Amino acid sequence: MIVEHGLYLHLPYCRSLCPYCAFAKAPLHRAEPERLLRALRAEWEMAREDDGRWGRPRTIFFGGGTPTALAPESLGELLAWIGDAFDLSRVREWTAEANPEGLTDEKLAVLRRGGVDRLSLGIQSLEPGVLRALGRIHSAAAALDAIARARRAAFTNISIDLMVAVPGETPEGVRRAVETVVELGVPHVSVYSLQVEEGTPLSAKVARGAVEAPGDEVAAARYEEIAAVLGCAGYVHYEVSNWALPGYESRHNTGYWARRPYLGLGPGAHSFDGVERWRNEEGVTRYYERVEEGALPRDDRAALSPRDEVEERIMLGLRRAQGLRRIELTRLAGPVATRWSEWAASAGAVRLDPPGRVRPTDRGLLLAQEISAELLARMSEAPPAPA
């Protein structure tokens, strides 16, 4: 039986490699678009043969890398293949990530004709010094122009990525960027704190003292300021890192947080079939080689243990403003759920009204990892239930 699912395609090429990025990627000057498309087709055929339930996506997401680094012809070929290979009759959202650099009117038109109806723009900042620190090669003016051109191409569902706690940023600059996004009426904003990922060029700079990354206190202050500005403008803080005007929440990402099945194709893509999780080979060239050898390029395939599933449901539930139903929280956490709920409510991290749900506040979303960890610790310390 075919199940509705999310579909993620990882397109790894970038015009410039950002020093903080730990995703599977390769420079555009080494791009092999034809090889990429052949590999995606072959991987899909093997995945469908392995599990016949895939094939009717509810949402689609092109990530990377930078999907729009591909030439218009390659994008068109990719979109045409998806239209032929999958049943798209139930698709409710189709997102493509894009960066301001290289996002031409022609590429926007190809995406729109091909069925893409949501654009996620990696703007990150409107401060020139911050863009340099992040290794971004676009300017603030180019970022704003990308929004305008997307609108002219009939994209109304646009999301903006911003990054905070970056060396060289200023509180005024962060606030101005958010206010600019609000003034432009961009309906969705994602905000991420800069993470120093092991093995990245940024990590090496931090290790030798060449760069000092702002700490958690700075990141928390930025989030609180952003939450205040966006909240006053009518944006709903619906997940730890995401704000949206009503009706513009990301359906694809909501599927991840709700633990719905999703299939990932391409190097480094992750998948979940409802029981097992796995990830694809992260090395771009090795991904191609494994697919060309006739093997699914999957690693670390495993089913979650009952305990891991409980922890995952709790952590994902507390990442979202809708929280968890009390009856579900009690089922997952046992008798400690009531005491923990009272503690979290007294700390201003959750609301217990309406009575049927435990809902994180803005403060609770900021502290989602901490309040989840506290609940899991209490569960571990609780005496076992009587037989």
Image (tube, helix red, strand yellow):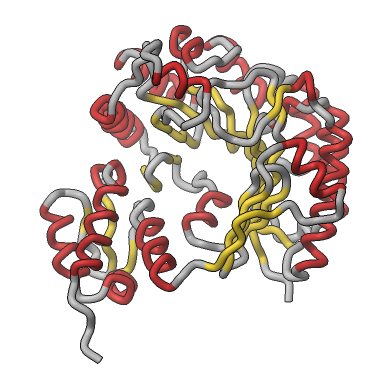
Q: Find the residue positioned furthest to the left.
A: 346
Q: Position of residue 135 (x, y in %)?
A: 54, 15
- 116 or 335, which is in the foreground? 335
Q: Find the residue positioned furthest to the front.
A: 208
Quarter occupied by residue 372:
bottom left
- 75 or 218, which is in the foreground? 218
Q: Decide: is 348 above or below 312.
A: above
Q: Position of residue 337 (x, y in %)?
A: 22, 69
* Figure label count: 0
Residue at left offset 40%, top offset 15%: 208
**Can residue 117 be seen?**
no
Say which quadrant the C terminus sits in: bottom left
**Can residue 198 be seen?**
yes
Residue at left offset 70%, top offset 42%: 267
Q: Position of residue 111 (x, y in %)?
A: 76, 35
Q: Position of residue 270 (x, y in %)?
A: 61, 51
Say which quadrant the N terminus sits in: bottom right
- 33 or 377, which is in the foreground? 377
Residue at left offset 65%, top offset 43%: 268
- 234 or 329, which is in the foreground? 329
Quarter occupied by residue 37:
top right
Q: Decide: is 244 above or below 339.
A: above
Q: Decide: is 192 above or below 180.
A: below
